Every structure is written in C-alpha cells, then in structure tokens.
Image (cartoon, rainbow, N blue to C red):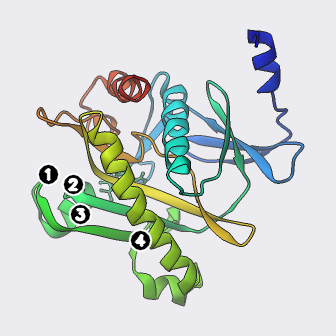
Amino acid sequence: MTNLQLIEENYMEKKEKLYEGKAKIVYSTEDPGLVIQHFKDDATAFNAAKKGTVANKGVMNNKISTKIFQFLEKEGIPTHFEKYLNDREMLIKKVEIVPVEVIIRNKAAGSLSRMLGLKEGAPLAATVLEFCYKKDELNDPLINEYHIKALRLASEEEINQIKRYTLKINELMSKFFANLNLELIDFKLEFGRYKGKIILADEISPDTCRLWEVGTGKKLDKDRFRHDLGNIEEAYQEVLSRIEK
Ligand code: UDP
C-alpha cells in the first residue's frame, strides 16, 4: 500500500467538537457510533491548579495508548479503541462514560501516600482498588461502592464488571511493563457503556500511570510534570521507545 493510500484509508472527517477536556478533544464523525479522540500537548495537575504543555505529549500518548489498547484487546478486554488514525488521533467507539475513575495501586504513591502517611514506593500487602467520583468542582473525591449506588453512578452489576476488568488489566499491564523493565506503581482507568455493556475507555499513558524504571526507580510519567523534575518529554519518549521495540 502506498503512503497516500494509507493516509486516505485512515482519513475520517471531523464533524463537530463534542467535548474538550484538559488533555483531549472529542469530535463526532459521519458515523454516529464512532468519534475521534484527539490528544493535546496540554498538561494539568492537582485538578488543573498547575497548567503547562509538554512538547509532543499528545503524539506520544496517542501512540502509547494505541499500543496498550491493542494489547488489552488481544488479551480479551473490550475497549473503545477502533483504529489509529494519525499522530494525534484515534478512532474510538462512542460510549457513555461512567463518571467514576478507577485507580489501582501496586505500591504507595501520590494521594495514597498523603492520605495514609505511607512512604513513596512503600510496598502494599495487597493490591488497592479505589474509586473517585469524576467531578472537577469537588476535586474528584474518593468514594466507595455505597456512594456509587447511592448516587446511581453505576449499577451493582456494572461495578462488579468494572472491578473484574480492572484487576485483570492490572495483571496484564504489570507484566506488559515488567517486560519493558518498568514497574507499574499505579494507574487510573475509565469505563463507558456501549450497547449495554461495559468497555474500557479514555486513555492509558504516562499521564494516567506511574511507571518507575526497574533498578534505578527513575520516574517515567506525569510526576515529572507535577513535581518539576525536568526531562518530561524524554521520559514519555523513553516509555514509547520501549513499547515500540
Ligand atoms: N490519575 C489520573 N487522573 C486523575 C487522578 C489520578 O490519571 O485525575 C492517575 C495518576 O496519574 C496516578 C494514579 O491515577 O497514576 C493515582 O493518582 P493519585 O490518586 O495518587 O493522585 P495524584 O497524587 O497524582 O494527584
């Protein structure tokens, strides 16, 4: 196939902007069941109290997310991923996002360290699964399954499915990154409803995972931006290069 054919095959007309978030924009397409997810270079942290841009971040996160979604699909996890379109865009299924962020923690870091007074990198005797209510005005508060039911954010059946997928994804992704000599410390997932079923949505990238190099403990994720550690672009590029090897 020539380059031009490839570009034509991957071309999808953007109709209208449906939503613009901190790091991504979603556009409608001529197909009502599919939308385009566009990755920006904008970075925010601490609920947008800190703002900036990271050169090329959108391109790198689009590529990293694509590879991870393809890997998870191959391993039997249903995702919204349809197709890589170009540097900054992927075609995805249009879902109704469940307004709950699901976090897995394999070691203590970030808000868990702060909340429980644990040293960064402290081992946990068991994997921790947390839910946060996706609500910027409230700072995405930590909630539990009772809150989810009380606010009708998801049904019990949906919560159970989300937990099963999340724990499986943790097993799969921990191995995936271990093979690249990276330790998956924690990550955040979002799920959506599609044709009555729960599927994995959003993105999986160094914006949403903590990844530490095995041996050196070097941080190759958004903590470099959060805490001004420098070399952010290089860190994301390092993750991408290892995935593409
Ligand atoms: N995370 C995310 N989006 C959020 C909150 C957290 O992607 O809105 C990710 C974050 O990058 C980390 C994990 O979820 O990999 C746990 O984040 P934590 O609760 O420790 O929050 P932080 O300390 O980053 O504010």
Q: Position of residue 148 (x, y in %)?
A: 50, 82
Which residue is identified by label 1?
Answer: 121
Which image quadrant for residue 207? top left
**Alpha carbon of mark 2 to alpha carbon of mark 3: how far?**
6 Å
Which image quadrant for residue 118? bottom left
**Alpha carbon of mark 4 to alpha carbon of mark 3: how far?**
12 Å
Residue type pointed to by label 3: Leu
Q: Is mark 3 within 8 Å of ligand 1?
A: yes
Residue drawn at the location 18% of the way across and 60% of the way down = 113
Task: Relative to 55, say whether 129 is above or below.
Answer: below
The answer to whether residue 102 of the structure is visible from this angle is no
Residue type pointed to by label 4: Phe
Residue drawn at the location 56% of the way across and 83% of the way down = 157
Residue type pointed to by label 2: Ala
- Viewport quadrant of the N terminus: top right
Q: Position of residue 149 (x, y in %)?
A: 53, 87
109 and 203: which one is in front?
203
Badge 3 marks a residue whose secondary structure is helix
**Alpha carbon of mark 2 to alpha carbon of mark 4: how far?**
16 Å
**Alpha carbon of mark 3 to alpha carbon of mark 1: how far?**
11 Å
Q: Is residue 106 left or right of residue 166?
A: left
Ligand number 1: quarter of image: bottom left
Disc number placed over residue 109 in the picture, else none: 2
Disc number placed over residue 131 in the picture, else none: 4
Q: Is mark 2 within 8 Å of ligand 1?
A: yes
